[in-house]
């Protein structure tokens, strides 16, 4: 396929995808009063994982707060978004995806496996949020957010494909 993409393009697409998802979450909050993702808890999980070497932290909600955990969580969120952009690019190179919104939607839907089967269990919420008060809602919101994220990813790669390389 031979896509001519630079590291800056991956950064732009990943950050843009996160911005689209974050904006969508803020709209859900304004319209339906659905709380956005708690990136502070992701920061706390990251800090405890790095400092204690323990990936599974089932009581992360009750562990003491870490100074700067919200900023760390936002940083991790955007770094993960850039990581997803790299995966998206590799899948483009393999011919599995293109810059279409259809490909973005498929990618976003597939990417929900990460929170369902890794992050939620690692944070004590169980596989597919089975240990939460409303697993179906948590899973649906994760799916919806990742769907929107995938659309943002396709949009990001559409933008960088339009900008001439320097």
Image (cartoon, helix red, strand yellow):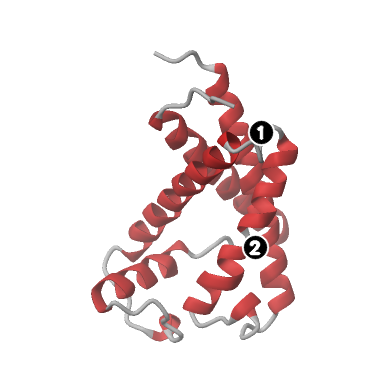
Q: Position of residue 75 (x, y in %)?
A: 37, 53
Q: Is residue 32 left or right of residue 129?
A: right
Q: Position of residue 3 (x, y in %)?
A: 54, 25
Give the camera-side residue of 16 and 103. 103
The residue at 37%/65% (across/down) is 43
The residue wearing badge 2 is 142
The earlier-in-sequence mark between 2 and 1 is 1
The residue at 66%/38% (across/down) is 97
Give the camera-side residue of 82 and 27. 82
Q: Up-down: is 82 above or below 66?
A: above
Give the camera-side residue of 166 and 137. 166
Q: Is residue 48 left or right of residue 156?
A: left
Q: Up-down: is 165 above or below 40?
A: above
Q: Secondary structure at mark 2?
A: helix
Q: Quick check: can you spot residue 28?
A: no
The residue at 45%/48% (across/down) is 83
Q: Secondary structure at mark 1?
A: loop
Give the camera-side residue of 22 and 51. 51
Task: Select label 2 or label 1 by which is in front.
Answer: 1
Disc sitting over residue 98 in the figure: 1
Crowding at mark 1 (Cα within 10 Å: few <14, some 14-19, many 20+): some
Q: Position of residue 73 (x, y in %)?
A: 39, 60
Q: CA distance from mark 2 to mark 1?
A: 23 Å
Quarter of the image for the C terminus: give it. Answer: top left
Image quarter for residue 61?
A: bottom left
Q: Up-down: is 13 above or below 114?
A: above
Q: Position of residue 2 (x, y in %)?
A: 54, 25
Image quarter for residue 65?
A: bottom left
Q: Up-down: is 117 above or below 26?
A: below
């Amino acid at each position: 396929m031979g896509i001519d993409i630079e590291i800056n393009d991956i950064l732009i697409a990943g950050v843009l995808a996160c911005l689209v998802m974050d904006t969508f979450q803020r709209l859900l909050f304004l319209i339906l009063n659905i709380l956005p993702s708690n990136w502070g808890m992701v920061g706390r999980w990251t800090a405890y994982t790095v400092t204690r070497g323990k990936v599974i932290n089932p009581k992360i909600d009750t562990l003491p707060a870490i100074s700067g955990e919200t900023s760390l969580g936002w940083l991790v969120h955007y770094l993960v978004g850039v990581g997803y952009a790299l995966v998206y690019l590799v899948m483009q190179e393999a011919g599995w995806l293109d810059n279409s919104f259809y490909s973005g939607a498929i990618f976003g839907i597939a990417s929900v496996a990460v929170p369902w089967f890794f992050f939620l269990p690692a944070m004590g919420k169980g596989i597919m949020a089975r240990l939460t008060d409303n697993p179906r809602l948590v899973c649906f919101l994760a799916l919806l957010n990742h769907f929107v994220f995938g659309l943002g990813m396709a949009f990001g790669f559409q933008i960088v494909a339009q900008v001439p390389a320097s």
